[in-house]
Amino acid sequence: QTRNMRKDIAFVDDDLVFSSNGDLMHVESDEKHIQDTINADVSWWKENATDGVGILNWLGGPALKQKLQKKLRLELESDGYRVSSPIVKFEPNGDLTINPNATI
């Protein structure tokens, strides 16, 4: 199954971007959508109240690595992405690194 990339209205520094004929510009937004899904928590979006990984809930819990990987896969696959072995690293300095390995 092939899917077109998601599109969204273009912004530069929180300002809308218009074409020369006055139409709103659209840009590919899959990367932004994936970031938003990882950051979002349940009930953030009225129309999709159960969507979101809620990454802030996972900080400080290296023992939760496998559960977080499963949640990433579940949420992104429910949005139509193919997810191949998401990488989650809890660094000793407290940083959390995520590579969702998500494609269309």
Image (spheres, grey):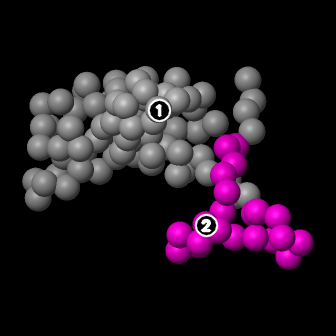
Amino acid, disc 1: Lys
The quadrant holding residue 63 is top left
The quadrant of the picture occupied by the C terminus is top right
Residue 78 image point, x, y percent: 52, 23
Residue 33 image point, x, y percent: 53, 45
The reply to whether the C-beta atoms of the residues labelled 1 and 2 are less than 8 Å apart is: no
Q: Earlier in the sequence, mark 1 or mark 2?
A: 2
Residue 30 image point, x, y percent: 59, 46
Which residue is rendered at x = 73% and y = 33% of the image?
3
- Label 2 Cα neighbours within 10 Å, binned few <14 / some 14-19 / many ≥20: some
**In the picture shown, does residue 93 fall above or below 18?**
above
> What span is colored magenta in the figure?
5-25
Mark 1–mark 2 Cα distance, whole angstroms, equals 23 Å
> Residue 46's mark?
1
Residue at the farthest right position: 21
Amino acid, disc 2: Phe
The quadrant of the picture occupied by the N terminus is top right
Return the residue at label 2: 11
Magenta segment, prevailing SS (helix, strand or loop): loop
Can I make out residue 100 in this image? Answer: no
Can I make out residue 52 in this image? Answer: yes
